[in-house]
Amino acid sequence: MHRVLVLGAGKIGALISGLLADSGDYAVQLADVDGAVASGVARAHGAGSLEAFALDASQGAALRRHLEAHPADAVISSLPYHCNVGVAEAARDLGLHYFDLTEDVEVTRAVRRIAADAATAFVPQCGLAPGFISIAANELIGHFDELRSVKLRVGALPQHPNNVLKYSLTWSTEGLINEYGNPCLAIADRRLVEAAPLEGLEEIEIDGTLYEAFNTSGGLGSLGETWGERCEQMNYKTMRYPGHCEQMRLLMNDLKLNHDRGTLKRILENAVPQTLQDVVIVYVAVAGRQEGELREENYVNKVYPQLIAGRLWSAIQVTTAAGITAVVDLVLAEPGRYRGFVRQEQFRLPQVLDNRFGSWYAMGGDKAVSARMVVEGRAGRQRRPAGAG
């Protein structure tokens, strides 16, 4: 069995640990600064191969002591992005494979430096965007003789928006603010350039529903470096319901809360509810020359909440956890194939979709599962308190 340490028992770490443990091929340690939270997740999963620990992984010495006492083959960080550099350093020192979900550009650059000449794999940006979107885009890019444009769009949205933001909190608030507030990378005229967040507003219509899309940070991943010199235009934008971008510009720019992110985080978490009834939209459009003709290919997928191990998991939990566990599975199946810094586009889309974890991206779902679970009062059981039946 592969031995893995999952750091962080929040929304995504809870499902990562369960998917791996329930497969029967992984011995999983789930560690969180709040040991009771990790224990609640482990009890809810009920898998004998999942063990919970209290651990403050932001303390490098404590993390190293834990790994020396409880050896692992790989460490998977589902911690806030600013914790990941220390985790990567510990993985390098102890000879472990490293995986994370970060969207932060500077953190990824630091991981790349740490990974130089490593004998193990360092695979950052394994989530939805960056992550799966990069893998999907790279697959389509390979179909073209010449590239003109690559558009990457992802939206994690409530199924039933009913507030001014037309949004619900479905994942890390810190990560959301980071994406909305930091400079974005794009390719323009075959050059890597910076673009302002919350700018580049456009409309997209998918299956009769209108969305807006705008620049956010980190979603391009390393794809711009890989293909930028051969592509005229490439950019990543986040999809939302129309009107959201204007409201976020008010909060972050006009009210200057991009410079007071702690206050913005408290405002959002106090005012915007969470939901398990969401939908994730993945949209890739690649245009260029095929056989001398100008053509476009698209990958479009909607993923809805899923029933996994008898419990409801939101679409953003499913897509993010499925993406990283599929990559972990592929790397640990062939560890000699992946060394040092590993880009998401080194994985093929068919590989990921055919993987036992990546198969949760399969098309054809709808919102009926989440609707039924909510009506039956069976949503929100991802943790089990001590003493619960």
Image (cartoon, grey):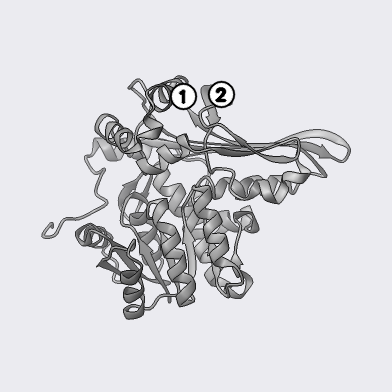
Nearest the viewer among 232 and 155 is 232
In the depicted structure, whether residue 320 falls above or below residue 289: below
Q: Which mark is residue 368?
A: none
Mark 2 and mark 1 residues within 8 Å of each other at the beta carbon: yes
At label 2, the amino acid type is: Leu
Q: Which mark is residue 201?
A: 2
Left or right: 160 as drawn, with respect to 35: right
The kind of secondary structure element at disc 1 is helix
Residue carrying label 1: 245
The kind of secondary structure element at disc 2 is loop
At label 1, the amino acid type is: Cys
In percent of the image, x 22 and y 62: which residue is there? 35
Quadrant containing the N terminus in the rendered view = bottom left
Residue 191 x, y percent position in the rendering? 72, 40
Residue 274 seen anywhere in this rendered image of the structure:
no
In percent of the image, x 59 and y 55: which residue is there? 344
